Amino acid sequence: MTLISLLIALLLDRFLSPFKEWKQLDLFKRYARKLCDLLSRYGDADSYLGLALVLLPVLVVVSLAQEILEDFMFGLGGLVFSIVVLMLMLGRNVEEDVEGFIEAYANDDEDKVSEATKDIVGEREFATARDRLQGVIETLLVQSNHSLFAVVFWFLLLGPVGAVLYRLSEELTHHDDICGNRLADRAAGWLALLDWAPARLTALGFGLTGSLEQALTALRYHFFNGFVSLAADNRAVLSSAGTGAMMLDDYLKDDVDAGMVSTVMGLLSNLLMRTLVVWIVVIALMTIANIF
């Protein structure tokens, strides 16, 4: 059932995206903002307790809904619920960012390139075109974990509740306007814990579909260096393993032009797709072995 839910959700999200507007999670943001306003009247809404109080009611509702629908119509209700929840929790489509960046370079318009870059990496500044391209690729490698692989990981472990837990935690890190900077920082610390295992499994997947030596080196240096640097280690292991698997340094020796950008971004897309296939094969084998 888990494998079927995963495959259907991934296919629908990639080719149809029927819940694209709902994936912005505007309803959750409004709920969280109102709850934080209420909590601030009685105590510190920016604490870890505040974070738990924001997340727990949603998780309880999802868990109850799953329990109710699990046996509805011989399990069909639970299957449909799992598919819908997973589709809603899958984050930003990295493939769309890749295509947008390629298109901006193909148009030979620096303003569009800058806009596409900002849309991916935010307000970061880069000294050269090579630095910009590398920064974009590293960001997309990290984003692929946030948007896809980590969501799938927690879905496999905890079902729809796991996918919701991860996505809402990740969403709170981006919105200090909901409950303030402190809650966003608390959410970032919590997210780093949730990211530890999937980030390293994703990095290993990069290695299995690219350069395994580079991935193992990244895993060895960034496996665990303490809780203080956990978030940075998560990002580093993904970016190092991913760029190493792509052999990015070999391509960055050439001048950055539309052709080179298209080639490198194509390598990135292929790497992510091959890694996803590896994950699906492993999940299928674990399903056959009755682990899921």
Image (cartoon, rainbow, N blue to C red):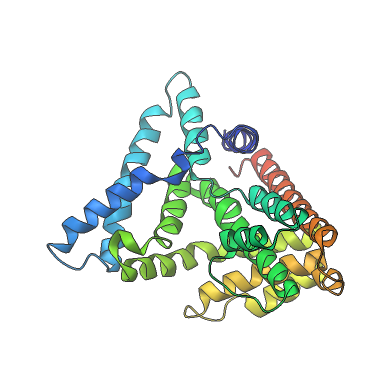
Q: Is residue 225 above or below residue 255?
A: below
Q: In front: 141, or 264?
A: 264
Q: Place residue 67 in its image quadrant.
A: top left
Question: How many dots with numbers?
Answer: 0
Give the residue at x 64% y 38%: 14
Horizontally, residue 244 falls left or right of residue 41, namely: right
Quarter holding the N terminus is: top right
Residue 201 seen anywhere in this rendered image of the structure: no
Q: Is residue 232 above or below residue 143?
A: below
Q: Is residue 70 above or below residue 203?
A: above
Give the residue at x 55% y 75%: 232
Give the residue at x 72% y 51%: 103
Residue furthest toward the left?
A: 42
Q: In front: 218, or 42?
A: 42
Horizontally, residue 30 falls left or right of residue 244, namely: left
Q: In front: 25, or 276?
A: 25
Residue 170 seen anywhere in this rendered image of the structure: yes
Quarter holding the C terminus is: top right
Q: Position of residue 276 (x, y in %)?
A: 70, 49
Q: Is residue 6 above or below residue 102?
A: above
Q: Position of residue 242 (x, y in %)?
A: 72, 65
Horizontally, residue 247 falls left or right of residue 225, namely: right
Q: Position of residue 142 (x, y in %)?
A: 61, 63
Q: Position of residue 36 (x, y in %)?
A: 23, 58
